Image: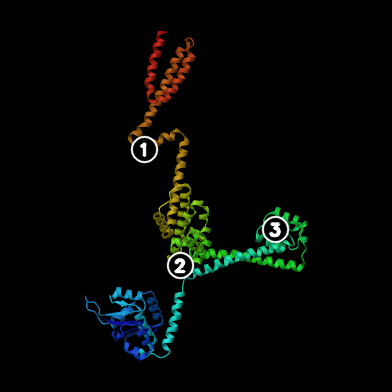
Amino acid sequence: MTLYLLYESASGYALFQAHGLDEIGQNTEAVRSSVTDINRFGKVAKLVGFNPFDSALDALNQCNAVSEGQMTDELRSFLDLSLPKVKEGKKPKFSVGVAEPKLGSHIYEVTKIPCQSNEFVLELLRGVRLHFNTFIANLKPGDLEKAQLGLGHSYSRAKVKFNVNRVDNMVIQAIFLLDTLDKDINSFSMRVREWYSWHFPELVKIVNDNYLYAKVAKFVENKSELSEDKIPGLTDIIGDEDKAKEIVEAAKASMGQDLSIIDLINVKQFAQRVMDLAEYRKKLYDYLVAKMNDIAPNLAALIGEVVGARLISHAGSLTNLAKCPSSTLQILGAEKALFRALKTRGNTPKYGLIFHSSFIGRASARNKGRMARYLANKCSIASRIDCFLEKSTTAFGDKLREQVEERLDFYDKGVAPRKNIDVMKVAMENAENKDTEMDVDEPTVATSVKKSKKKKSKTEAAEDGEAMAEDKPTAVPNGDDSEEPKSEKKKKKEKRKLEEETDQAAEKASGVNGFNADEGTAKKKKKKKSKDDGVDLPVASEGKKKKKKSKSEDE
């Protein structure tokens, strides 16, 4: 089988045919010895075709495609023209040697040309690279070096090119500087306290905060000059008038030694340096928060800006963090404890840098490991979304944070959390349709206002009286409901007639011994019962009438 060699130079594609391989026996040692000698290697390799690049930009695009293992259209047309044509249904009697195995597999997938990449092919390509100037006839001595230099610079520049707003290297430097500043400010503040305590030792117990202590030390300077006139200035610094008065009183009875003017100036300057460092630390923290919201908004929304920046810096970059599985991310930062546990066959650590998250601190002692595992899972998802999503959104991070909150409630209270697929659907809808959701929310608010107005009008109508209540049922389309108000009016008329008749009967029977009071009370009870009974009232009242008439006739 004939072997062809594909060589990608800085000036173009070149295809060579290898001769006499059977005599060499494909021995890499023999090829390695023959590579340095152009007379021997010239007999082995023969130039078949050369396709120069059109421009520097075209060379850069072809180089990027080769590095990614992709065959371009130019390379395919060059291979079709240079290689022997194969009839349909028959296997080719040749193979192509390439330096990149990924490129060879892609060529085979597209063109069905067999490719190989091994030590023997690499040694042959090394000889081609060494003697490439001699194979190309019209190539000047310095042209190839210039092309290689220009392509190398442009290729490196293209690899370094990135979105300026999404530079994770800035986050790594910022978090390192933030940690260094924390240590430096702490040590410098302790030095200010120790230095100024020789002059004013009582101030340490009154002011606990390092930044405020440096401010007060700069403001007070000489304790002997501190009077009640400086209380307003101290209250502005400390924010508490009682503490300011306490400082003034302590200065009057202080046990510290006096310092010279030069010593006080040095203490004041050093306190100013500490204050400047503390203020710069605040600005740096704000810068870190802003960069994290640009680079990894979902990770920052889930676990916080500082912890997310520590994870990115420890992994090396956001891409490396996205490549990490959740089990690696869980113990990121606890490598020493992990390898010590593996060496001593002890318990492996449950968490690393994510221990600084508030979620693990809120979990109970027996659920901290489970919470760390769940949180690492969500952090892995968030980092991959931030790394590969082109749009910058916090919709996924907010929903992942809600899931972690629900998991905490599940561990503590037993409340069942939502399914992951449902939450992710909602997150995708929120990310894609933010503007449409805002438009939909406004009509819903208007309808809710209308409903509340209707409810208010109904309550007002109910309070107006029975007339409105009687008019409303007439609007109901059902026939049975429309007949109800009429029957109620008839019942009222009948009740009034019955009451008048009973009153007349009571007046007639007013002369009977001692029955008036009993009858009156009985009548009242009957009236109450008649109101409760409703429809049965007329029948009962007619029976009572007949009894009363019979009694009056007997008398």
Label located before the other in sequence (3 or 1) = 3
Q: Position of residue 274 (x, y in %)?
A: 65, 65
Q: Looking at the image, can residue 369 be seen?
A: yes
Q: Which color scheme does this rendered protein use?
A: rainbow
Label 3 secondary element: helix
Q: Residue at x 44, y 75 (%)?
A: 159
Q: Is residue 387 left or right of residue 276?
A: left
Q: Residues within 10 Å of mark 2 (few under 14, many from 20)?
A: some
Between tags 3 and 1, which lies in front? 3
| Front-most of residues 419 and 441 | 419
Residue 204, labelled with which disc?
3
Mark 1 — residue? 476
Instruction: Work out whether 9 lies above or below 343.
Output: below
Between tags 1 and 2, which lies in front? 2
Residue 296, labelled with which disc?
none
Q: CA distance from mark 2 to mark 3?
A: 46 Å
Q: Position of residue 427 (x, y in %)?
A: 42, 57
Residue type at the position of mark 2: Asn
Q: Which quadrant does the C terminus fall into?
A: top left
Mark 2 — residue? 320
Q: Is residue 116 left or right of residue 197?
A: left
Instruction: Work out whether 239 lies above or below 13.
Output: above
Q: Residues within 10 Å of mark 1 (few under 14, many from 20)?
A: few
Label 2 secondary element: helix
Residue type at the position of mark 3: Val
Label located before the other in sequence (2 or 3) = 3
